[in-house]
Amino acid sequence: MLQIALVAAAATGVVTVAVATRRFPRPVHDPVDLTGLGLPPGIVIFTSTECANCKDAIAVVRRSGVAVREVTWELEGRLLERAGVTAVPLTVVLDGAGRVVDQMAGVPRRRRLQRALAAKSLAAPTAPPTLHP
């Protein structure tokens, strides 16, 4: 009886670990069109005050060191509609001409955001290397 209980407990632990570490698919969003909306180059993040993930997304984006334009549904809902934004948070990286370099639904991954910024030379400047004689 004790052996059955131990086997059952071990099996439950394995299933719990497998479910907890499983990678869930990232959210996706149809491509947005921001041309003609007067948004600046850099990062544009579409949010809502009711969105729990939006706070996490904003924190990731602000750590990038690049100019961020937040567009909130409650304040600028018409702009979200014109852009074709149907879900938040949505992070969009724009190049100097206002073209979409990348867009990330949900909380953006820091590495992907940095790659998108680097692709169009929008990354925050880093300090030059220190030379030691």
Image (cartoon, rainbow, N blue to C red):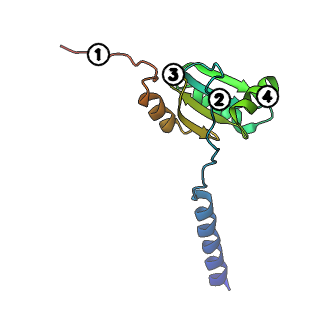
Which quadrant of the structure image shows residue 57? Answer: top right
Callout 4: helix, strand or loop?
helix
Q: CA distance from mark 2 to mark 3?
A: 18 Å
The tag earlier along the polypeptide, 4 or 2, is 2
> Which residue type carries mark 3?
Ala
Which type of secondary structure does the marked residue at label 2 adopt?
strand
At x 51%, y 21%, the residue is 97
**Of all residues shown, which one is farthest toward the left?**
133
**Residue bearing mark 4:** 77
How far, Cα to Cα, is label 3 from label 4?
24 Å
Q: Identify the residue position indicated by label 2 in the image.
A: 45
Q: Are marks 3 and 4 in contact (CB under 8 Å)?
A: no
**Residue annotated with mark 3:** 97
Q: Among all residues in the image, which is located at the extreme front?
A: 36
Q: For this rendering, which residue is in front, 95 or 69? A: 95
Residue at x 74% of width, y 26% of height: 79
Seen at 59% across and 32% down, the residue is 92
Real-space CA distance between mark 4 and mark 2, rounded to the nearest whole angstrom = 13 Å
Labels 2 and 1: the sequence-earlier one: 2
Q: Please identify, in this view, whether the residue under mark 2 or under mark 1 is nearer the observer.
A: 2
Front of the two marks 3 and 1 = 3
What's the distance in space between the residues labelled 4 and 1, CA to CA?
47 Å
* Element type at mark 3: loop
* Residue 46 sits above or below residue 20 on the image: above
The residue under label 1 is 130
Say whether disc 3 or disc 1 marks the residue closer to the N-terminus: 3
